[in-house]
Image (cartoon, grey):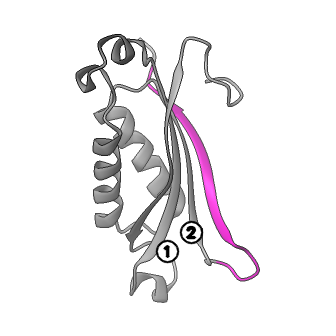
Amino acid sequence: MRNGVPPSNTDVLYLHDLQADCIIGIWDWERQTTQTIILDLDMGIDIRPAAAHDAIDYAVDYKAVTEQITRFIGSSRYALLETLAEEVARLVLQEFPVLWVRLRMAKRGAIGRTAEVGVVIERSRPGP
C-alpha cells in the first residue's frame, strides 16, 4: 500500500466498527475494569478466486477474522493502544492470507473533551 492507496490489483475486505472489551491503559483505574476498543480493519486481498468459485474456501472468512481479533483483544492486557494495534495487525497478517492491513483503533471517552483517541497503522507482509 502506498500513501493509503492499495495497488490496483488489490481489493479491500473490511470490518468496521468492531468492538471488543479488554483491560488496557496506563492508569491504575484502567487496570481495574474493561474498556471498549473500537476498530476499523481494511485488508488487502485478491477477491477474484473467491468470486470465480463462489466459495468460502477461496475467500478470507471475515467471521473468522472477527472472532480471532475479538478473542485476542479480550484476553490482552497491554498498557498502550499502540502495542495492541501492532499485535492485532501482526495476528491478521500471520493467520489470514491478506497482503496488507490498515487498522484504526480507538478508545472512547479516554480523555475529556474528546469523543475518542486512537491510532491508525498500516502494515504489510514482508517481501520475498
Residue 10 % position (x, y): 53, 17
The amino acid beneath tag 2 is: Lys
How many callouts does the rendering have? Answer: 2
Q: Residue furthest front?
A: 54
- What element does badge 1 sit on? loop
Residue 116 lies in the magenta-colored region: yes
Instruction: Name the residue rendered at 47%, 56% in the picture.
Output: 83
Image height of 40 relative to 77, above or below: above
As drawn, the label of residue 106 is: none
Instruction: Name the residue rendered at 35%, 10% in the picture.
Output: 52
Instruction: Name the residue rendered at 41%, 82% in the picture.
Output: 31
The amino acid beneath tag 1 is: Gly
Q: Residue furthest left?
A: 57
As drawn, the label of residue 107 is: 2
Residue under label 1: 25
Nearest the viewer among 62 and 31 is: 62
- What element does badge 2 sit on? strand
Image height of 19 relative to 30, above or below: above
Contact between marks 2 and 1 (CB within 8 A): the answer is yes
Query: What's the magenta region?
Result: 111-126
Residue 117 % position (x, y): 65, 66
Residue 57 % position (x, y): 23, 23
Q: Quadrant of the N terminus?
A: top right
